[in-house]
Image (spheres, helix red, strand yellow):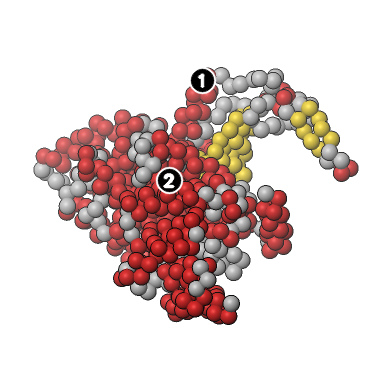
């Protein structure tokens, strides 16, 4: 095996082992930042040694032992005399063998709980959103700093700094390496789901031409979501989010044209939707609903996505059901964007007048003041109601607001044909 | 990227109809499947009945010809598969290495082709095929 090949193999081992390694170390050291650092040190050691020695039979155990030896070295080297640290040193010796065995099996329940603790810590509300995203990708996803930087189109030192600062913030805030309980758990879980969905959207929104690392983010979020669903199987919204991501990801191959322009959902070639992901999404959605979480915001969005996924042809879409789901979503998470989507669903289900009734109050909404889709949607309703002149004015407004050239052209064309007709 | 891990159990080409793995090896495999699932990489997995109850359809001379199993001339047959979603070929290999396979078993790793792997003309042909499928619905 060449050095480059060995390095790639080590990266693969790392990707599989890093989260468990960091989580296990964090439990012992009660310090996520230090755990991550020591795990990285172990990786560096492996990168130095394995090209010569070959990859060990039990790489996970090797990495764990290396990381723990580093931990011991560091503690002794600093000659920290205070009892707490001495005690940790002793714990390390004693726990080492047991933990190595547990980590090596990789199936131990405690490791699962540690991993869950790690995810909760990485997404802790004391951290900025950017920091949560970076830490999650780094510690749970096992991504390298440069990969995160490329994915978010920022310089590598920016990400490195973000991670250092995040670790410091966690230490300063004295965030315990624990599973939150009771009402706190709900709030913390919300933060975790937000971070995962944000990562997903960052990747999903990235279409073509750019670095392959950006779309990779959607994969990564989906993977972390699936991991979380195994770690917290009783949480309906986790399954709801996974369902939403699986179904959205199922459209990846169909959602952009050869020129890299997005294709609207109803115009997509449904033969290119990934049925495997759809099936997985529908299964996760069913789980969320069985757990009584059918009205969670993610489960509702997943249910809407599922209506589209189940329709073999656009004409088969159950718009009445979608309209009802948007009604529910508007109650759970009211927002102008949800309202605009609700208007479209109602128009499809009950006719343009029904859509227009929902859209009218949105014209006073400051958040949508410069949002081109509001006049585009309203123009569409007006056109269908035969109010051509008003429709044309709306299409012109939409053309002036959009930043997308192609969309502008479409809007201007609709403005012309509407007035003419 | 997606990879298929194809399980090729030696001797399965001669397995009688209805042969299933014993409870102990199923338990070991379930543990492995669980590990794949916990890591968020498992998309699908299935075991296959032995070829003795399968059939082969060949096309020599442009005409489909059906042969019932077992297939005397075939040396290696599929016993099952895993479909995994991982970041690299190396990661797929690393997962395969962790399978509790027995002496007679081999796992072959094959990457799943995606539209972006094909040249323009193949993609165009595939697009036409898809459009046709859509019309058929």
Which label number is shown at residue A312? none
- In the picture provided, is A120 more to the left or to the right than A211? left
Name above or below for residue B127 compared with residue A290: below
Q: As rendered, which of A32 and A44 lies closer to the eye?
A: A32
- What SS does tag 1 mark? helix
User: Tags 1 and 2 in contact by the CB under 8 Å rule?
Assistant: no
Indicate the chain on which mark 2 is placed: A
Disc 2 target residue = A242
Rendered residue at 71%/58% (across/down)? B128
Name above or below for residue B9 compared with residue A15: above
Rendered residue at 37%/35% (across/down)? A291
The quadrant the C terminus of chain A occupies is bottom right
The reply to whether residue A127 is visible in this rendering is yes
The reply to whether residue A144 is visible in this rendering is no
**Residue A406: % across, % down:** 54, 74
Disc 1 target residue = B24
Indicate the chain on which mark 1 is placed: B
Q: Residues within 10 Å of mark 1 (few under 14, many from 20)?
A: few
């Amino acid at each position: 095996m060449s050095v480059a090949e060995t390095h790639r193999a080590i990266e693969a081992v790392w990707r599989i082992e890093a989260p468990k390694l960091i989580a296990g170390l964090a439990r012992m050291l009660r310090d996520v930042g230090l755990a991550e650092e020591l795990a990285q040190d172990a990786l560096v050691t492996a990168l130095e040694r394995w090209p010569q020695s070959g990859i060990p039979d039990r790489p996970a155990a090797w990495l764990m032992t290396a990381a723990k030896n580093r931990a011991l070295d560091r503690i002794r080297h600093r000659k920290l005399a205070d009892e707490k640290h001495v005690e940790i040193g002793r714990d390390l010796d004693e726990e080492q063998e047991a933990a190595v065995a547990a980590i090596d099996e990789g199936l131990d329940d405690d490791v699962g709980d540690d991993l869950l603790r790690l995810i909760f810590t990485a997404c802790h509300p004391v951290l900025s959103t950017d920091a949560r995203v970076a830490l999650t990708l780094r510690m749970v996803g096992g991504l390298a700093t440069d990969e995160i930087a490329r994915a978010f189109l920022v310089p590598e030192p920016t990400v490195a700094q973000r991670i250092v600062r995040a670790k410091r913030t966690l230490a300063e805030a004295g965030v315990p390496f624990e599973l939150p309980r009771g009402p706190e758990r709900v709030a913390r879980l919300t933060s975790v789901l937000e971070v995962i969905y944000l990562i997903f959207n960052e990747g999903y929104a990235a279409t073509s031409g750019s670095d392959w690392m950006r779309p990779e983010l959607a994969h990564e979020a989906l993977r972390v979501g699936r991991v979380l669903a195994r770690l917290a199987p009783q949480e309906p919204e986790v399954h709801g989010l996974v369902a939403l991501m699986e179904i959205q990801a199922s459209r990846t191959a169909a959602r952009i044209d050869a020129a890299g322009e997005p294709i609207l959902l109803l115009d997509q070639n449904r033969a290119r939707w990934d049925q495997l992901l759809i099936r997985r999404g529908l299964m996760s959605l069913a789980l969320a609903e069985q757990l009584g979480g059918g009205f969670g915001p993610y489960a509702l969005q997943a249910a809407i996505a599922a209506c589209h996924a189940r329709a073999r042809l656009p004409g088969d879409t159950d718009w009445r059901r979608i309209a009802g789901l948007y009604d529910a979503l508007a109650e759970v998470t009211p927002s102008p964007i949800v309202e605009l989507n609700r208007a479209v669903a109602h128009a499809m289900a009950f006719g343009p007048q029904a859509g227009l009734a929902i859209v009218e109050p949105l014209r006073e909404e400051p958040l949508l003041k410069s949002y081109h889709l509001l006049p585009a949607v309203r123009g569409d309703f007006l056109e269908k109601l035969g109010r051509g002149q008003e429709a044309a004015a709306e299409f012109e407004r939409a053309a002036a607001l959009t930043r997308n050239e192609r969309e502008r052209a479409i809007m201007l064309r609709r403005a012309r044909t509407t007035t003419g007709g | 990227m997606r990879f298929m891990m194809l399980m090729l159990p030696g001797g399965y080409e001669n397995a009688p109809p209805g042969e299933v793995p014993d409870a102990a090896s199923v338990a070991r495999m379930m543990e492995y499947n669980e590990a794949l699932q916990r890591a968020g990489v498992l998309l699908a997995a299935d075991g296959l009945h032995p070829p003795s109850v399968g059939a082969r359809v060949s096309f020599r001379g442009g005409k489909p010809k059906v042969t019932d199993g077992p297939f005397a001339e075939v040396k290696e047959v599929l016993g099952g598969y895993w479909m995994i979603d991982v970041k690299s070929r190396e990661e797929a290999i690393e997962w395969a290495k962790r399978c509790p396979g027995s002496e007679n078993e081999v796992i072959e790793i094959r990457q799943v082709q995606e539209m972006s792997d094909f040249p323009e003309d193949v993609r165009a042909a595939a697009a036409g095929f898809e459009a046709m499928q859509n019309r058929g619905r």
